[in-house]
Amino acid sequence: MTASHLVHHLGVFASDFAASESFYTNALAALDVRAGYRTETIAEYWIPEHDAPSLSLETARTSAEVTRGLHLAFEAADRAAVDAFHQAAVRAGGSSRHEPRHWPEYGAYAAFVNDPDGNNIEALVKEADVS
C-alpha cells in the first residue's frame, strides 16, 4: 500500500466557530480549497474532487479544547494565490503576521496570518531563490 499524502486530515477546534468559519472559508477559497461538508458546528475543507488531505474545523466544547499554537501551511499555485490568500484572510478577520514576500531561506514565496484563535496560518509556493 502506497501513501500519497503525509497527512490525511487535521482538526482545528475554534473558540468562535462563526468567526473561524468565515476566516477559513474566505482565506482558503483563494487557494481553491472549499467547504465540502458543513453543519452548524463543523466545516470540512478540501480541494474539489479530492477529499484528502482535508481540514476539519469544529467548535471547541471547552476552552481547554481550543486549538492554539498551531502553524499550518497550505500550498498555493502561484504568487497571485498567496497574495489573494493574505488579502482574503485579513479581510475575514485574520491578522497579518508577515505580508507576502520571497523567503530565500525556504525557497518559497509565502504569507502568514493569525486565525481568530491566534494560530499561524501560511500559504506558500515553492520556488527558486530569486531574491
Image: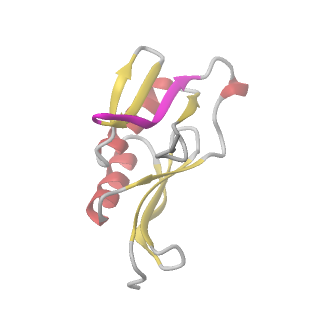
Q: Residue at x 41, y 15 (%)?
A: 39
**The magenta segment:** 48-59
Instruction: Tell me, yes or no, whether the highlighted magenta stretch contains residue 17.
Output: no
Residue 122: percent from left, percent from top = 48, 55
Left or right: residue 106 compared with residue 18: right
17 relative to 80, above or below:
above
Q: Residue at x 34, y 29 (%)?
A: 35
Residue 99: percent from left, percent from top = 42, 64
Residue 92: percent from left, percent from top = 37, 41
Quarter of the C terminus within the rendering: bottom left
In this rendered view, identify the residue nearer to me: 36 or 71.
36
Instruction: Tell me, yes or no, whether the highlighted magenta stretch contains residue 53.
Output: yes
Residue 32: percent from left, percent from top = 28, 44
**Outermost residue toward the right?**
64
59 relative to 117, above or below:
above
**Outermost residue toward the bottom?**
131
